């Protein structure tokens, strides 16, 4: 059996595979910090060489001073479908550094977990795909599909230049299938395939009261307080039971399908574990929906920040000159950030107190994403994962927004997009002591091998 | 006529009087800035010497490292009533220094105005009293009343040590009548006697949501947002038309007397001038009360500051861990800060969302002040001012809170307390280019001479 021998090869190279991953993890690729620019370049070059070594043709795409995007391509045959795999080699900052139990860029294994910044988000995830491709190529000299690999270095800083590169080099990215290797398991032990994401709409509200802070004794009772106006506005965005009050907000919301609600109902929801890990008293839900539904398939509105007046120690008795707030909404299919922004601005105009000046700034939004999970891409993955993770993956929709997923789907004009990965929600991505299961890393390599073989089989027997 | 000759003496010493005031104005007595500690001490010594020179017995009272309080006493006769006069020699900081047209501690006269930091608040005001006393003493060797002068150096930093000194040296301060020389005219050309002040109640609200900022995509819809809770609380403190909703808040509020409302109705209220100078679109009022009433004899509630979450550029999609607000209330007779604080805390408990942790901190409050203006102290002042300012003073209540006024009234156990001064609301106190009318400074000296003679006459003919 060819499949069996490819798997054996992976198992026989266990230590070398880990050593290579550790080499990759040692690069401090913090994209948010300019002093690491050279580390990002070195990592891109390391990845380029790695891809060349295992048989890919490579290009480093670069714009302005942004870190390079590593593009690698293995063309087996023009007759075969092309799969584009997305990952990112940049990582989050490491502070608070004092909370790390081991140095973030000196990977170690403890109790079956690799500890290092970026191991789960996203180096360990996309590297599993490279290792799988390497194993197949070394065994049969080719791959069952054409594969394009795109690994960027700005995901943690909103993929600032990705759209520009994607638009100007669409040919390099062109593909039939898209795999975003930046999602993960539903919870430890329950692998998942993600077929939907929420979108984003983001506003800044600035309110101007008096030209300067005025004395609250001298003027209190006579001068309109901008914070009072802000409270009035923010408080009218939702009802007490959490429904968003912007007229028309829910008009285009796609209700989850019955099968989706059934699927979600079968998933474990660790309410107590969430409460304990976040230190909250209760997990909320939108009326008529479970907490999981509320956090993934229903739209939300949250105030992300407020400011204005005095916030130092003790008392300062002023009516402040100005104040403001940041408001984010998570959108669901088929809401559009542009339409919601219009509705929001219209609504604010109707509820805004007239005695102050209000300015609304619309910040960049992200379209929600939804694809059909009942397609060969998902079927092949589901089977491949079942063979390696002791159980089939669950189909889920994510609560967050991944800008590149939409970009790729829209610009490459394909509905065949799937998001997955082997990381878990409690891996501590973006937090100290980020970690990733050694076992899941290797199970992921095996699963990806099986996915390629399985998808090719489905494709060939059409 | 003795009175006439005393007045002539003042007029004949016009330049010397200004020179002395200028000497006092040159001291940079910024109490908020530790590097000026030595300037505060030097000024206290300068004032002590000045008081000694004109015939007073003096003491410098000091506690800890606070600037000294200058205490000066002229005892004419144990049979006569004793008047305590309060002023302060410290001044506000000078920033933004670039907006000053002349150096703040190099006084100059332009268009009949003296420009210098502290000239209106409060050096020019209390110095007018010293000059009046000096003139009478130099003419008749004594004063019509016993006079105690108290000039502190911490008024601009909430008179931090004044209560301690007043309590431990009550005998030094003991008096029958109190004059606070730190108020002013109602508006330029309309002198005023202030017989009431609003009090203050101040709170800090801190709300804790999740233990750390969490991702609004991952958790939005499920995790309670502390800002949402803060909005709910702050928005329920007032109705849309501005009434404060704390149960019992208005129970002890003393309605203004019909004569007070009549007096206020006769006062000019420069709505357009206030709008223009503050850059606001409208001047508000509590329903059923004029703007002036709303700003002086009615209680208010203002949010003085809010904070929480992200306030930097662009968007950050979080549900913040914590947020907070500062809330101040101006109280009127007979509200008590202690009772209002209890009502506030009880009310917050009833309206507070249960899903977050809320902490209320009560900051130091100030009792409102009200005295009877139909008493000899006011009658004598009214007549004295009428003789020198082309019109009688108006009786007003101030919207702000003066902690020392209450302290003196309470600890010295007298109802005979009056607040006045010759400064105007547009003198720019606490702002760049603070100024004070030369003419009003001299009219003030004359008025205080006449007040002393008039009060003694009333006292002697009881």
Image: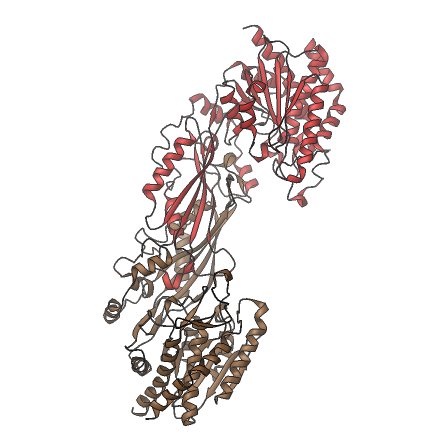
Chain colours: A brown, B red
| Residue B364 vertical position relative to residue B280 in the rendered view, above or below | above
Q: Nearer the viewer, residue B136 or B218?
A: B218
Name the residue rendered at 43%, 26% in the picture. B333
Give percent across and percent down for residue A207. 48, 50
Give percent across and percent down for residue B415. 49, 18
Name the residue rendered at 52%, 17% in the picture. B416
Quadrant occupied by the N terminus of chain A: bottom left
Quadrant occupied by the C terminus of chain A: bottom left
Confirm whether residue B422 shows in the render.
no
Q: State the image quarter where residue B75 is shown.
A: top right
Q: Left or right: B257 with respect to B382?
A: left
Name the residue rendered at 45%, 84% in the picture. A148
| Residue A141 vertical position relative to residue B245 in the rendered view, above or below | below
Name the residue rendered at 46%, 75% in the picture. A123
Furthest toward the front, the residue is A111
Confirm whether residue B54 shows in the render.
yes
Give percent across and percent down for residue A146. 42, 88
| Residue A192 vertical position relative to residue B348 in the rendered view, above or below | below
Q: Nearer the viewer, residue B197 or B204?
A: B204
Q: Nearer the viewer, residue B402 or A151?
A: A151
Q: Nearer the viewer, residue B457 or B140?
A: B140
């Amino acid at each position: 059996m060819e499949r069996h021998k490819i798997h054996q090869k992976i198992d026989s190279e266990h230590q070398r595979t880990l050593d290579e991953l550790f080499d990759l993890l040692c690069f401090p690729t913090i994209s948010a910090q300019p002093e690491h620019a050279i580390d990002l370049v070195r990592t891109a070059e390391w990845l380029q060489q790695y891809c060349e070594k295992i048989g890919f043709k490579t290009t480093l795409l670069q714009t302005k001073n942004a870190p390079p995007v590593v593009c690698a391509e293995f063309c087996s045959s023009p007759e075969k479908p092309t799969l584009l795999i997305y990952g990112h080699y940049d990582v989050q900052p490491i502070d608070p550094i004092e909370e790390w139990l081991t140095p973030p860029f000196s990977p170690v294994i403890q109790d079956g977990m690799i500890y290092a910044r970026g191991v789960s988000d996203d180096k360990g995830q996309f590297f599993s795909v490279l290792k799988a491709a390497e194993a197949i190529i070394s065994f049969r000299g080719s791959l069952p599909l054409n594969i394009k690999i795109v690994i960027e270095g700005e995901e943690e800083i909103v993929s600032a230049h990705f759209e520009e590169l994607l638009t100007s080099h669409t040919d390099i990215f062109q593909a039939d299938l898209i795999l975003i290797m930046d999602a993960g398991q539903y919870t430890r032990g329950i692998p998942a395939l993600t077929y939907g994401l929420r979108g984003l709409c983001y506003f800044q509200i600035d309110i101007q009261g008096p030209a300067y802070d005025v004395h609250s004794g001298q003027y209190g009772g006579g001068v309109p307080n901008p914070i009072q106006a802000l409270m009035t506005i923010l408080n009218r965005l939702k009802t007490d039971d959490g429904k968003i009050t912007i007229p028309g907000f829910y008009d285009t919301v796609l209700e989850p399908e019955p099968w989706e609600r059934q699927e979600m109902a079968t998933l474990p929801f660790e309410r107590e574990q969430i409460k304990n890990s976040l230190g909250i008293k209760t997990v909320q839900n939108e009326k008529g929906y479970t907490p999981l539904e509320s956090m993934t398939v229903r739209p939300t509105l949250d105030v992300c920040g407020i400011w204005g007046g005095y916030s130092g120690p003790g008392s300062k008795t002023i009516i402040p000159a100005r104040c403001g707030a940041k408001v984010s909404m998570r959108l669901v299919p088929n809401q559009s950030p542009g339409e919601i922004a219009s509705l929001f601005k219209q609504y604010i105009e109707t509820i805004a107190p007239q005695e102050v000046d209000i300015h609304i700034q619309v910040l960049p939004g992200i379209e929600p994403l939804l694809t059909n999970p009942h397609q060969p891409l998902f079927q092949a993955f589901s089977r491949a994962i079942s063979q390696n993770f002791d159980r089939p993956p669950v189909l889920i929709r994510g609560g967050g927004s991944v800008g590149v997923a939409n970009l790729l789907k829209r610009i490459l004009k394909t509905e065949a997009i799937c998001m997955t990965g082997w990381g878990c929600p409690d891996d501590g991505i973006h937090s100290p002591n980020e970690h990733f299961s050694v076992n899941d890393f290797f199970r992921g390599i095996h699963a990806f091998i099986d996915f390629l073989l399985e998808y090719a089989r489905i494709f060939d027997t059409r």
